Image (spheres, coloured by chain):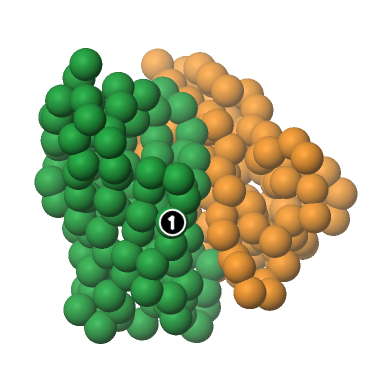
Chain colours: A green, B orange
Amino acid sequence: KQEVTQIPAALSVPEGENLVLNCSFTDSAIYNLQWFRQDPGKGLTSLLLIQSSQREQTSGRLNASLDKSSGRSTLYIAASQPGDSATYLCAVKRAGGTSYGKLTFGQGTILTVHP
Amino acid sequence: NAGVMQNPRHLVRRRGQEARLRCSPMKGHSHVYWYRQLPEEGLKFMVYLQKENIIDESGMPKERFSAEFPKEGPSILRIQQVVRGDSAAYFCASSPPASGNNEQFFGPGTRLTVL
């Protein structure tokens, strides 16, 4: 059974800092990994998707890396801003089988960036 | 291109009533997924559907819950005889036909409160 863990559970930083969010998963047979952002009381916004054959993806100030063999992904946020404050979720999709479409989520990291 | 749409956004039911949650996927998307987010818990997969077919319902409670995605119209998640423990945010996601990028796009969610 796939389990996804995110560390830290919460993070509070001053504006301008570079920061790293960590995600680990127990089963390396994944199809892809997605990072999402969730604002309080809102839905999920997809930030980055990394296919299992890729090592990293970048979008603006965000960079996500994937080390499938060790079961780890990191989300790097450069020059953080108060508007980055949200819960960040990592989710993996298993390769093959009947659970092809299903995403398994971590518990999330609650990020607060203060001015 | 409108995103994934869910309605209602908020739903209040008394114990024993039925709840119907609707999800319209993004245009061109033929895969629909339902997830549940209980208070203070992470998102959990419930069911994965394609048009007129349930592909994976491994996350659905065995009783009172059902889902459909008819040939025409939105996907429906139906909860019969609701109980207080059903209070949660229910999210729908959609993805395009399985060819390469299977990124899932999420709707804003339906927040169900059972009194």
Residue identifier under label 1: A58
- Which residue is at a point 58% across and 38% down the rendered structure image? B107
Q: Nearer the viewer, residue B96 or B8?
A: B96
Q: For residue A37, which quarter of the picture? A: top left
- Which residue is at a point 50% across and 83% down the rendered structure image? A96
Q: Nearer the viewer, residue A18 or B21?
A: A18
To which chain does the residue with label 1 belong?
Answer: A
Q: Is residue B13 above or below residue A5?
A: above
Q: Is residue A61 above or below residue A99?
A: above
Please state the horizontal and vertical placement of residue A89, each as a whole percent of the image: 33, 47
Q: Amino acid at mark 1?
A: Thr
Question: Is residue A4 visible in the rendered structure shown here?
Answer: no
Quarter the C terminus of chain A occupies: top left
Query: How many labels, in total?
Result: 1
Q: Nearer the viewer, residue B66 or B38?
A: B38
Neighbor class of circle 1 (other Cα within 10 Å; few <14, some 14-19, many 20+) is some
Q: Nearer the viewer, residue A82 or A30?
A: A82
Q: Is residue B7 above or below residue A33?
A: above
Please state the horizontal and vertical placement of residue B44, each as a whole percent of the image: 38, 51
Q: For residue A101, which quarter of the picture? A: bottom right
Please give left or right for residue A25 compared with residue B51 in the image.
Answer: left
Please give left or right for residue A41 compared with residue B47 in the image.
Answer: left
Under circle 1, the secondary element is strand
Please state the horizontal and vertical placement of residue A97, each as a whole percent of the image: 49, 83
Quarter the N terminus of chain A occupies: bottom left
- Which residue is at a point 14% across and 30% down the rendered structure image? A13
Question: Is residue A31 visible in the rendered structure shown here?
Answer: yes
Please give left or right for residue A32 compared with residue A77 in the image.
Answer: right
Please state the horizontal and vertical placement of residue A22, each as a whole percent of the image: 20, 55
- Which residue is at a point 32% across and 70% down the rendered structure image? A66
